[in-house]
Amino acid sequence: MGWSIRAWPFAGLALIAAVGTLLLASGVGAAPGGRTTDQTVQHLLDRLVGTPGGPIGAIVTLYRHGRTTVLRAGRADAAAPGPPRRRDHMRIASISKAFTGAVALHLVQKGRLDLDDTIGRRLPGVMPRAWSMVTVREMLNHTSGLPDYTQSNGFRMQARTHPRGYVSPIQIIGWVHKEGLRFTPGSRYEYSNTDNIVVGLIAQRVSGRPFGQLLSTLVFRPAGLRQTAFPTRRVSLPTPYMHGYAVEPGKPPQDVTTFLSPSGAWASGAIVSTPVDLGAFIRADLGGRFFGSAQRREQLRFISGASSPPGPGRNAAGLAIFRYQTPCGTVYGHTGNFPGYVQWAAATPDGRRSVTTSLNIAAPAGVLLQQLRSLQATAVCALLGR
C-alpha cells in the first residue's frame, strides 16, 4: 500500500522496503515492425517470476478497444497448481488511496468539502492542534508534513504483539498524535500514509456516513466493481484469491496473506479487489465517472514526487494519483505494496485504456524493482500500440 515494509517484523524474515526512483526503463522490446507485442510483455513477466527471490506469481491486464488481455506467470498459490486469474481477489494496498481521493473529489464537487479546507476546520478537537492548518489538498498530494504512522513505535508494537487485531482510525492517529509536522505544509513532497487516514475521517464527518459506505456508494457501484470490498475486521480474503508471500532466495516462500489486519491500513490501503476490477476502477477514475471537470483539473496538477514503490518512468504526484512518463507515453494511476502484494494500476488520460500489474510478493528492491519497472514500461508500450 505504500507502507514501509520495514515496519512489519516477519519472524526471522528480512522484508526489504521499496527504494527510491530509478532511471527510466530502457531497451523495451518491440516487434519487427516497431510495435511492442504482448509476447514481449509476457517474456518480461516470465523473467521476473523466474528471478531468484522473485514473486511466486504475477498477472498483467491490458484493456484496449473494449477487451481485456490477461498475461500470467507462476502460481497464485505456491502449494497448488494454477496461475493468477483475472478474478482472483488480492490486497490492492495503496491503490486504495486513489479510491479515497475519488471520494474526496466527489464531495468537493457536491460542495460538501473544499480542497483548501483544513484539518482544524473539519475535525476540530479531534486531531492535534499542530496539524490544524494542513489542508485536504496537501494531504491528497502528500505535501502535508503529517508524520507517517507506519514509522511509529505504536505501529511496530501492534505488528509484533497483535498483527491480526482490529485497530480503529482514531487509534492509528493516536500512534503519532504527539508528533509535530515534519515540515511546513505545502513546502515539499513526502509520502505519508497518515494523509489518507485523516482524509477518510474528514469524508465521514462532512457526509455523516461511514467511509466504507461512501466507497460503496460513490465508487464501487458507479464503476461496476462487483468484486471489490473494504474489509476492516475480516483478515481472510474472499475466494478465489491470490496468496501473498514473503520470499527470500534459497528459502521456502512464507504465506503472509492473513498476517495483518487490514484495519491498520483503513483509507490508506485496506481495499480488496481483483485485477479486472482494478482496471475498471482506474479507467473510471480517469474517465470522469466520480467527479466533474473542475475537480479533474485539480486532480491532474502535478508536483515532483514518486509513488511507493515508484512506478515506471518518471513519476509526479497529483491529488491521489500519479503521472508516469514512460518512453512510449504517459499514463496515470497509483502503485502500492502490502506484505505479500505489489500492485500498479494506470490508465490513459481519457480512461479508455488501462494496465495493471499484480505480484504476490513483498515490495521488491534492486534488480527486482528494475525488472518490475521495465515490465510496466513495456506494458505501457503494448497498451498504447507503440
Image (tube, helix red, strand yellow):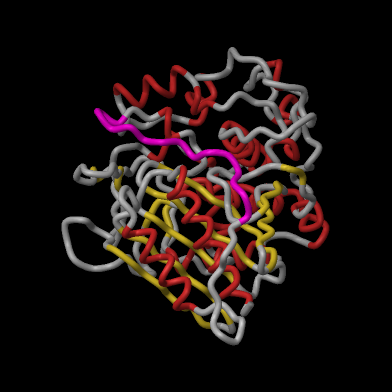
Q: Which residues are magenta?
A: 10-24
Q: Residue 155: x, y in percent?
A: 43, 24
Residue positioned most to the top: 178
Residue positioned most to the left: 79
Is 13 colored magenta in this rendering? Answer: yes
155 left or right of 290 in image: left
Q: Main secondary structure of the magenta part?
A: loop
Q: Is residue 250 above or below residue 150?
A: below
Work out whether residue 327 or residue 122 is closer to the camera in this orientation and state it. 327
The quarter of the rendered structure image containing the C terminus is bottom right
Seen at 65% across and 36% down, the residue is 202
Is 216 colored magenta in this rendering? Answer: no
Seen at 37% across and 68% down, the residue is 87
254 left or right of 176 in image: left
Which quadrant holds residue 222?
Answer: bottom right
Seen at 72% across and 48% down, the residue is 318
Q: How many marks?
A: 0
Which quadrant holds residue 120?
Answer: top right
